[in-house]
Image (cartoon, rainbow, N blue to C red):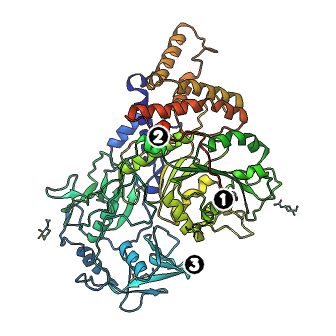
Amino acid sequence: MARWLGLRSVLVLLALASLALLILNGVISQESLSKVVLGDRAGSKVKTELFSRLSGGGSARSVRADGHAETSRSTTPAGAVFATVTTTLQTLSVAELATPGMPAPVEEESAPPSFQLARDLCPLGFYNISDLETCRLGARTLRKRFAGAVDAGHEPSGCLHRLADNDVLFNRAFSRKRNRQRQLICADRIPKLVEVGSQPAVEVESQPASSVAAPVPSSIGNLSITGRVCPEGSFAIQTPHRCETAAKVLSKKYIGIMKSLGEPHGCLHRVGDQDVMFNRLRTPQQSDQRQLVCSTEKDPEMIRAKKLSRSDALQLKLYCFAWTVRSEREELLLPYARSLFQGCDGHGFFTDREASVTPEERDDFVQVDLPPTQQNRSEKFWLLLKNMVGLLPAWKYLLDMNVTSGMDWVVNLELDHFFVANLLRQTIGDYINLMIQDGLPHQNPWEDPVMLIFGNVFAFNAALVASMKREWQTVGQVISDRGSLGLGCPVISGARAHAEGHCEQDMVYEHLQDVMPLAIVGANGCGNLAVSDSLIPFPLGCWQDFPYGDDEAARLRALNKLVQIWKFSDQEAESYCTSAWKWVKSRALSAPCCAGSEHGEGEEASCPKLVRSRFVPIIHNVKTPQLHAAAQQLLPLAEWHVSRVEETKDTQNTWRTVRLAGSPAGGPSP
Ligand SMILES: *[C@@H]1O[C@H](CO)[C@@H](O)[C@H](O)[C@H]1NC(C)=O
Ligand SMILES: *[C@@H]1O[C@H](CO)[C@@H](O)[C@H](O)[C@H]1NC(C)=O
Ligand SMILES: *[C@@H]1O[C@H](CO)[C@@H](O)[C@H](O)[C@H]1NC(C)=O
Ligand SMILES: *[C@@H]1O[C@H](CO)[C@@H](O)[C@H](O)[C@H]1NC(C)=O
């Protein structure tokens, strides 16, 4: 296969194939699975299987996005439905009027509505708020900070006032939950909405490279549900927000956003159950079971943020930090790790108060107070699989002391990561650009909270760091129940902490999306691949695919091989595996020997794994000083790669003026 297909296409196909398999098996769906798992399980025969299954169309199982309200289902027969409504946004209110308990729409843009706080039920003459914009307006009118929208099944639905911090938030999820710490915000009428499909005006420090204009206000138009193409004079709805609005106007249940390779792209009406959903993935699929929702009004023009050039990406300011228990093993790695962390614009190592920290180390070591746990510090595996016990206080320190202010991204790494700050900057830039290309509302990496996942390394953008600070009341909660195994773990770790006592960062960080609006992009699990909405794989963020085995000697052999492979030109790298296979095959024909030679036995299987590592920003499981030392041979090659890409992609060769690894680090001062 690889003979005629070129290495890159093979990798892309493998990525797509395994993605499709997982989706077809119902393993993945929906936003939270913006990460897509690609393991070894993706065999080469998968490709053909994928495309035959894909062309089978609607066999895919799509999983529900969230627990949205079970509203009364329209009894309209399947087939073409045509809902004629007037073309202003007023229609939304008119449609809502049909639901009992909904207020009359405001006739004129005259007086703004009044708002009131209520415990359980809105007082007479006041109504529940069912949309984000009215909730935002309510917060403003009541002079409270608006903390944004959440999808939290454990919170009451609607527009809520949180007593603890006096913030207002809008919970999109349907729930019947009550909470004495939350008040309802009620309005005496629904105001005329001015924006649909718009992004919320999140207050963040301005970013140099961003130029996102507010979308033009628009109306939902005359809607129709048709077959595979929209009728002349109407347009397919391309944003989730408008899809949701359209569902409301059509009195259909909106079941949310999904990522499904087996479905057509866009705002879809499912013939079977008459629900409306939005498939983010830009697939070329068509299906008789899925009808397009179309509108006579085009989606508002989204002016996208400018893409980052390679040299812009090298200007990204990174703060890198790690938690360490200062075990003997980790201490041996520290000198190597420190020199890598110094490639970031700021860095810090966090440990507990009982660890010894010398005065010289205080430049980049911070000691934090830990909550009580079920373990004694002297235990051999102290805090193993529980590093959030240390990371949460580390975050508190970073946020309280404004350590990361001015940074674009805050990156949580570990001492057994070999990483190159400049490759990390470039990779973050590539991820940002793919997100900009996808262009979904609320996913602007410059303005909206975004978490990038590179295996078990997590990068937080400035907007997310700001949200975490705002939401610290919730995010910073620690399990304090002495009867729980999870004592000392963050409350957001959930059941796993209580049941097993574990709270690893790669199992916990993603739960932030339960308590704040958050876009998560990338693949959890080192070596896994994620794919953008446009079906373009994100560059590999983390590599740990040591092909010769996991003992130190085998890993050393692999790292030394990487040094050789990173020196190849792209062409050489592409042909390398093919030629390795040819060589093995020709040897196999002439003589059954190969051991000890350049392309030894097993090279066939290991070759693609090795080549896949090229210029990956992070290598994981570099667990001994010897391995770190071997990996350091990759540093000059990485910097050479960064400069070379600059030369070919940019006419002005600016990279040299930009920082290189080793720039002075502004570590936190305790
Ligand atoms: C308004 O919201 C509250 C709390 O979520 C709920 O109990 C009540 O039934 C809602 N009222 C209407 C009319 O939807
Ligand atoms: C929408 O429907 C109304 C009523 O049928 C019609 O008067 C109006 O022209 C339609 N608008 C568009 C843009 O087609
Ligand atoms: C921790 O140490 C104390 C005193 O040394 C002991 O009583 C306790 O049982 C230990 N706890 C655990 C979980 O081992
Ligand atoms: C951090 O920044 C906030 C807001 O700018 C400020 O109020 C606070 O005093 C700062 N804290 C420190 C320790 O500098």
Residue 246 position in % (x across, y down): 28, 66
Residue 443 position in % (x across, y down): 41, 57
The residue closer to the viewer here, 371 or 65, is 371
In the image: residue 333, left or right of residue 182: right
Residue 236 seen in this snapshot: yes
Residue labelled with disc 3: 164
Looking at the rendered structure, the secondary structure element under dot 3 is: loop
Q: Earlier in the sequence, mark 1 or mark 2?
A: 1
- The amino acid at mark 1 is Ala
Q: Which mark is residue 110?
A: none
Asked whether the beta carbons under mark 1 and mark 3 sit within 8 Å of each other, the answer is: no
Looking at the rendered structure, the secondary structure element under dot 2 is: loop
Q: Which mark is residue 539?
A: 2
The quarter of the image holding the N terminus is top left
Q: In which quarter of the image is residue 255?
A: bottom left
- The amino acid at mark 2 is Pro
Residue labelled with disc 1: 394
- CA–CA distance between discs 2 and 3? 41 Å
